[in-house]
Image (cartoon, grey):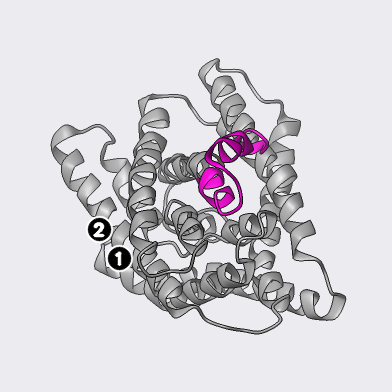
Amino acid sequence: MDWFVNLVSEILPLYAISVLGFIAGKSLKIDTKSITTLTIYMMSPIVFFLSLAQVSFNTGTLIAPAITFVTASLVAPLVLKTTKLYLGERTPYLSALSTGTSNWGYFGLPIAFSLFNPEQVAAYIMIGFGLQLFENTFGVYYISRGHKSPLESLFAIFKFPAIYAIIAGISLSYLKVDIPSEGEKLLELFKGAYTVLGMMIIGLGIANLDKFRIDVPFTLTMCLLRFALWPALATLIIYLDTDLNILGEEYYKPLMLFSIMPMAANNIAFAAQFNMHPGKASVAVLITTLAALFYIPWALQFFGI
């Protein structure tokens, strides 16, 4: 029972931050796109760079994110083709982005800190960077395809600084370059701001809606992807790894926790940046995040995390 109390105490403040974002959006008329621009172009690159630069470089450092990146990259085009059969003209591109992203950072990291030892937290972070890489490469490509040609969408990838921050951080980790103590203090400051802004984006997105409307087919698709397909994929990966022993047992529980996260708040950010149904994304993110309050405690018990 103590674990449940600890879990609730970690995630309830995240919901409170989203409520504050909603209040700020309604009372102060804050422009969501300005906040998402700050998050994408400033906060995310700094957090990714400093986090990766401090990770001890080993085989798992490359294998764990590679597995999640490849998994997302294979599933996303299948989701794109499938959702084109029943969703609106541009919504499938939002679905493709959402398939390979989750709220593993803003929402999941506090839970990981409450459940895992430092080594498992590091494993969780490395698993998450696979989706971060997808989000800033194929994810950007898919979300921009709603308005741009394939070539223009390809070039759009290189306009976002997070991809360069990820490469630079991994390079410093590989070269074993020590980050000064000031860098660690900067990371702590930015991590807190990153979480606050990320969760506020959910509330801001809802506050800026002219009309609250649920796209039922899209939202159900997202719930199935986040709460059924990804846990099934994680279970399959773990099953295969018990024979291959590529990841190692220390990655199994972090991978399962990673697989049960709700939709990424960054979906709202990218939808706003590319004018791709940010309202629809906001509602779906809100619903999956609310569902996670009940789903995650059950899933932790069911999967033995």
* Residue under pointer 2: 232
**Alpha-carbon neighbours of circle 2 within 10 Å: few (<14), some, or many (≥20)?**
some
For image coordinates 35% across by 31% down, the residue present is 63
Report x, y in % for residue 250: 31, 42
- What is the magenta segment's predominant secondary structure? helix
Compare residues 241 and 277 and report the one nearer the observer.
277
Answer yes or no: do the residues labelled 1 and 2 have beta carbons within 8 Å? yes
Quadrant where the N terminus sits is bottom left
Q: Quadrant of residue 160?
A: top right
Report x, y in % for residue 145: 55, 49
Q: Which mark is residue 142?
A: none
Report x, y in % for residue 50: 64, 34
69 relative to 80, above or below:
above
State whether residue 121 appears in this view: yes
14 relative to 106, above or below:
below
Magenta extent: 139-162
* Residue under pointer 1: 228
